Amino acid sequence: MNHQTFVTTGRGLHRHTPPMRLYEKAKRLGIWNPTDIDFSQDKKDWQTLSPDEQDILLRLSAMFQAGEEAVTLDLLPLIMTIAQEGRLEEEMYLTTFLFEEAKHTDFFQRFIHEVTGTTTNLSHYHTENYRIIFYEALPQALQQLTHDPSPAAQIRAAVTYNMVVEGMLAETGYHAYFTVLTQNNLMPGQQQGIRLLKQDESRHIAYGIYLISRLVATDDSLWHIVEETMNELTIPALGVVGDAFACYDPVPFGLVESDFIEYAMRQLQKRIERLERARGASLAEIERVTAEIIERDDG
């Protein structure tokens, strides 16, 4: 299809909108290079860990590694769908998603190879619950958009990606990393990288909540897609967390499974509550509330 007009030589960019606010934050906070992170102390710390301590951190890293690669591979249909709708401000922000997910893939690969020294296949750490989410649900939901860019398909993709993969699993994984590394004064390079990743992901989640809110506010009949997707994926998502703990007795570093299950559910519940408030709200109200959250958030 030929272009008939251009936003920037027509109405101009709406710089006050949530996507443009996120884009500004991404330009300011998201330009970091995994290659610059110093892993020299991390390598020394790794050698002091017991086999089970090494194994649980390698398990966590292997789940993150494949997860970051998965979203890097599967994200393009969402970007293309938003672009085809002519939502330039949203597309501009979404361009940072792909760059950041690729950067996260790069980061975990460096950690696994340079710090742990592992060069073998790590897919044995991917349990059946993990495969349901990352091998099946995530690519299916995002690739569906290539032939069905409907609002319902967009909601399913955003719930799967932003609420489950990022909002439940990634954030719970970051929480586990920080609990282990900060309480034990370990691996300053990995601590730095995870802190930067968490900032990036917080922007991704903010956009996903904004997208779902915008669609639900426009058509409340779409709410059942949110509920259906969450009902379908919450159990395997919690299973991913539980599977990691089931492999150890005792669990290394004194980690307690219920702490992380409860954390994952709190992250989910607070986002569901935000989405529920979008039902029946005006788009102006959604933009106002989202903008306030973006400005308050460190990411």
Image (cartoon, rainbow, N blue to C red):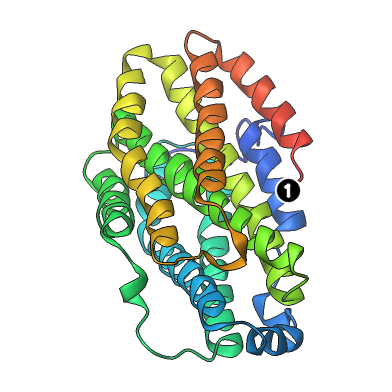
* Residue that numbered label 1 is attached to: 25
Q: Secondary structure at mark 1?
A: helix
> 98 above or below 39?
above
Residue furthest left in the image: 147
Answer whether residue 2 is visible to the viewer in this image. no
Q: Amino acid at mark 1?
A: Lys
Residue at horizontal 49 percent and vertical 77 percent from the top: 55
Q: Where residue 44 appears, x then y in whole percent?
A: 71, 89
Residue at horizontal 74 percent and vertical 89 percent from the top: 40
Residue furthest top in the image: 280
Residue at horizontal 50 percent and vertical 50 percent from the top: 257
- In the image, 193 versus 142, the foreground residue is 193
Q: The N terminus appears in which quarter of the rendering?
A: top left
> 189 above or below 286?
below
Q: Where residue 211 appears, x then y in whole percent?
A: 49, 32
Q: Where is residue 235, by image quadrant?
A: top left
Answer whether residue 289 is visible to the viewer in this image. yes
Q: Residues within 10 Å of mark 1 (few under 14, many from 20)?
A: many
Q: Where is residue 37, by image quadrant?
A: bottom right
